[in-house]
Image (cartoon, helix red, strand yellow):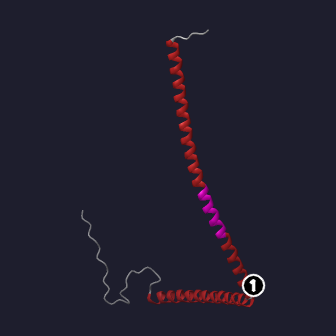
Amino acid sequence: MWFVTARRHNDELAAAQNEIAALRRRVLDTQDRHDEVARAHNRLAKRLAEADAANRRLYDRNLELGRRVSALAESDLEYAAHLERRKTSLEKAGHRILAAWRREQKRADHLQQRLDDAVGLSTTIVDSGRWQPGYKPAPTPEVAP
């Protein structure tokens, strides 16, 4: 027969109750974490479902637009050829306009140089009295000692 003292019984009982309390806390913490993970999982599943629905809508829309583009491209090849000819014509006209502008710019520069030579502007101006009757030379500044 085994006898247990009251003190030993109380110590073992307190240890068992402490162990039970610790296990209860662990279970509650685990339940809280499980609930949190479940909520996160539900949020993620909802977002994934929304993204999947949006993706399916975009896929369908993309297919429809692709069909429309194909139909337009195949429907009027003559119009596409006309647009290509028009583009080529406009490019040629642009090149001609730029060439004419460059020629006129060169001509204007040449005429400006001839005008400058005629009025004496091609060299450093010392006295413009020949073509400006009211010309007076700038006064020389006096330097204080």
Is 47 one of the magenta-colored residues?
yes
Residue drawn 54% across the image and 38% down it: 29
Residue 111 vs residue 76, the one in the foreground: 76
Residue 91 vs residue 16, the one in the foreground: 16
Residue drawn 71% across the image and 79% down it: 67
Residue 69 percent location from the top left of the image: 70, 80
Residue 14 percent location from the top left of the image: 50, 21
Residue 125 vs residue 42, the one in the foreground: 42
Magenta span dominant secondary structure: helix
In the shown orientation, is residue 51 left or right of residue 18? right
Residue drawn 64% across the image and 90% down it: 93
Residue stretch rendered in magenta on the structure? 45-58
Count of marks placed on residues: 1
Identify the residue position indicated by label 1 in the image: 74
Residue 42 percent location from the top left of the image: 59, 53
Whether 57 is drawn above or below 44: the answer is: below
Whether 57 is drawn above or below 40: the answer is: below
Quadrant in the picture for the C terminus: bottom left
Residue 44 vs residue 77, the one in the foreground: 44
Residue drawn 68% across the image and 69% down it: 59
Q: Quadrant of residue 20?
A: top right
The residue type indicated by label 1 comes to: Glu
Q: Residue furthest left?
A: 144
In the shown orientation, is residue 63 left or right of residue 17? right
In the shown orientation, is residue 144 left or right of residue 104? left
Q: Quadrant of residue 83?
A: bottom right
In the shown orientation, is residue 97 left or right of residue 145? right
